[in-house]
Image (cartoon, rainbow, N blue to C red):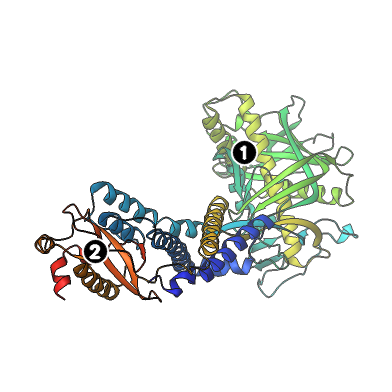
């Protein structure tokens, strides 16, 4: 029979599926994002999560399949009270309500069964897509501390601890993020290496590594901002995807041009008989003041490259005048091509500005953008910082190694040559642009180093707090379109089930007979045989009744007794003229039992 358990078993299951799918839908609509701890647990237990999702999706799909099959069985059992079913139709109903494949039907019905079986496989992947966790992001607001030059007492800007337990040399600070120092000699090589590729494009943009051990890369110019990436800790966030903040800093614009009025040159100060010659810089700086003297030891004058420099405080710019011992016209002896820098002047102008710093913490990329129209007042520390940068430019050229060619000049020529190869052309414009990029790289990295050295050395007020918009990893459960599909499917099944419950008055009129139960089938067939034997009035029918029941045979389902508890199966009609059994006991319907296909009626009668 259609057991009471089968009648109501789908109801709690549908309540569970409803609660799950509508909870997930509500979470999507409300914009719920899982916590960072949940994300980390999911990432570290990815295999377990996958198995759990698959198991749960199959269980939820099984509830839907069971409910649909129960609806079909209920409708069919109730319909047999008014209709007669042929054997193959009943066989088909039995197959699709299992659901399972059968190959004993016609090809049309077999194909239909196959489609039903395939369709029964779709709820599971739909559920998996609706409940699987997917990586997402959520934005939070926080305050972070970043390195800064903003200090009340600017005279103490470069005051740091004299030594640390991490480094034995005074003026060096070794921390997990790298080695930092106010002494240029400790990072001269890194500066030159970065400037050597200042114009090189990577993926269509200029990128250069941050000169520490954090692994971050600047995309475009840094302007000295964004130095805190890799050092900044965000409260209550372990591993942010990215964050963004605004930083007040110094904007530096570099412009290089020809200036024929430059008075600067190298003067030899040693004997001609010496194997190595000593040369000194001489001349005037851009402001007209006498330049300092720097001495270089070289084999040939063509190896010389240096610059005079001065910080023009009223105009807030560092003015660099390039000089070389090579002749711009005698290219045969100019093996380093330093002669192209004759009469070149570069001005580095400082302005107060606001920057928007975007830190991609996952990709280790920093992007600093100038905010349009956000020029700020000249900060109190501006002249102190610019003067320090000017001092570094003096240290760079003063300590340069020039035997075999000055390294600063070789790095500059290398950058210009790489730019020429990228652009596919040479000329003065390319040379000037490459020179501007070179000095922009130097000044940007010097500003970043000053920021970080103040932080590492424990200088007074090394950081300031700024508001930040932080993007942290999160989780969303399921894809929204699949959630809607599951919710609609669940609602349709639930409504259909409730309607069937009301229509059948909780299945009170359902025949107490289970076609899936072989024991009930055998008993019903036995009782039907007895009734069939009594109904035969012509002895000639005995011989014809020994034929097997065909697919075209229709069967009646009857019940004996007032309580109608004993089901009976009898033939309704056959092509051979078998007389149907009278329905005095009350004909309720018809059903086919596959077990009877090869069950002779005569044997039923004899039993």
Q: Which residue is mark 1?
A: 304
Q: Is residue 545 left or right of residue 6?
A: left
The quadrant in which the N terminus is found is bottom left
Q: Are marks 2 and 1 in contact (CB under 8 Å)?
A: no
Q: Quadrant of residue 510?
A: bottom left
Viewer-proximal residue among 236 and 465: 236
Q: Position of residue 117 (x, y in %)?
A: 34, 56
User: What is the CA distance from the residue labelled 2 to the residue labelled 1?
Assistant: 104 Å
Q: Quadrant of residue 84?
A: bottom left
The kind of secondary structure element at disc 1 is loop
Q: Residues within 10 Å of mark 2 (few under 14, many from 20)?
A: some
Q: Position of residue 184 (x, y in %)?
A: 69, 55
Q: Which residue is mark 2?
A: 594
Q: Is residue 292 left or right of residue 496?
A: right
Q: Position of residue 249 (x, y in %)?
A: 80, 49
In the displayed structure, would residue 533 be above or below residue 87?
A: below
Q: Name the residue: 74% across, 24% down.
A: 260
Viewer-proximal residue among 19 and 276: 19
The kind of secondary structure element at disc 2 is helix
In the displayed structure, would residue 174 be above or below residue 392?
A: below
Observer able to see residue 306: yes
Q: Is residue 448 left or right of residue 37?
A: right
Viewer-proximal residue among 373 and 503: 503
Q: Position of residue 126 (x, y in %)?
A: 47, 56
Closest to the camera, between mark 2 and mark 1, is 2
Q: Residue furthest front?
A: 537
């Amino acid at each position: 029979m259609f057991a009471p358990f089968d009648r109501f078993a789908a109801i709690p299951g549908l309540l569970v599926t409803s609660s799950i799918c509508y909870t997930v839908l509500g979470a999507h609509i409300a914009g719920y994002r899982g916590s960072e701890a949940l994300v980390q647990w999911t990432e570290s237990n990815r295999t377990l999560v996958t198995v759990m999702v698959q198991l749960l999706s199959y269980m939820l799909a099984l509830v839907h399949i069971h409910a649909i099959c129960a609806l079909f069985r209920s409708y069919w059992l109730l319909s047999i009270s008014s209709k007669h079913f042929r054997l193959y139709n009943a066989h088909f109903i039995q197959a699709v309500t299992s659901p399972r494949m059968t190959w004993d039907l016609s090809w049309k019905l077999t194909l239909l069964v196959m489609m039903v079986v395939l369709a029964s496989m779709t709820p599971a992947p739909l559920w998996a897509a609706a409940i699987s966790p997917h990586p997402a992001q959520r934005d939070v607001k926080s305050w972070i501390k970043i390195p800064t030059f903003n200090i009340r007492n600017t005279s103490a800007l470069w005051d740091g601890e004299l030594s640390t337990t991490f480094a034995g040399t005074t003026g060096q600070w070794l921390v997990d993020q790298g080695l930092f120092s106010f002494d240029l000699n400790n990072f001269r090589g890194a500066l030159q290496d970065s400037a050597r590729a200042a114009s090189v494009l990577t993926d269509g943009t200029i990128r250069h590594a941050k000169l520490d051990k954090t692994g971050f890369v600047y995309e475009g110019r840094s302007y000295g901002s964004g130095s805190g990436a890799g050092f900044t800790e965000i409260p209550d966030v372990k591993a942010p995807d990215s964050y963004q903040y605004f930083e007040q800093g110094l904007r530096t614009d570099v412009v290089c041009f020809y200036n024929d009025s430059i008075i600067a040159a190298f003067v030899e100060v040693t004997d001609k008989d010496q194997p190595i010659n000593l040369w000194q810089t001489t001349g005037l700086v851009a402001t007209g003041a006498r330049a300092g003297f720097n001495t270089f030891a070289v084999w040939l004058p063509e190896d010389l490259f240096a610059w005079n420099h001065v910080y023009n405080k009223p105009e807030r710019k560092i003015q660099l005048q390039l000089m070389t011992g090579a002749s711009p016209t005698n290219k045969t002896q100019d093996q380093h091509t330093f002669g192209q820098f004759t009469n070149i002047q570069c001005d580095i102008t400082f302005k107060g500005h606001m920057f928007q710093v975007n830190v991609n913490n996952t990709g280790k990329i920093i992007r600093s953008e100038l905010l349009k129209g956000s020029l700020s007042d000249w900060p109190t520390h501006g002249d102190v910082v610019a003067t320090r940068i000017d001092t570094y430019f003096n240290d760079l050229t003063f300590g340069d190694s020039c035997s075999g060619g000055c390294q600063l000049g070789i790095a500059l020529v290398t950058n210009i040559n790489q730019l020429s190869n990228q652009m596919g052309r040479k000329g003065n414009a390319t040379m000037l642009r490459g020179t501007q990029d070179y000095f922009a790289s130097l000044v940007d990295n010097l500003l970043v180093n000053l920021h970080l050295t103040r932080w590492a050395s424990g200088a007074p007020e090394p950081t300031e707090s700024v508001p930040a918009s932080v993007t942290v990893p999160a989780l969303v459960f399921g894809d929204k379109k699949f959630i809607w599909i599951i919710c609609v499917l669940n609602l349709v099944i639930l409504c259909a089930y409730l309607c069937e419950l009301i229509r059948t008055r909780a299945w009170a009129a359902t025949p107490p007979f289970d076609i899936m139960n072989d024991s009930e089938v055998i008993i019903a067939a036995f009782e039907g045989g007895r009734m069939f034997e009594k109904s035969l009035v012509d002895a000639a029918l005995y011989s014809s009744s020994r034929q097997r029941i065909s697919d075209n045979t229709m069967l009646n389902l009857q019940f004996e007794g007032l309580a109608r508890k004993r089901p009976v199966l009898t033939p309704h009609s056959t092509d051979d003229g078998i007389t149907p059994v009278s329905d005095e006991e009350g004909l309720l319907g018809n059903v086919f039992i596959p077990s009877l296909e090869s069950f002779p009626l005569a044997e039923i009668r004899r039993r």
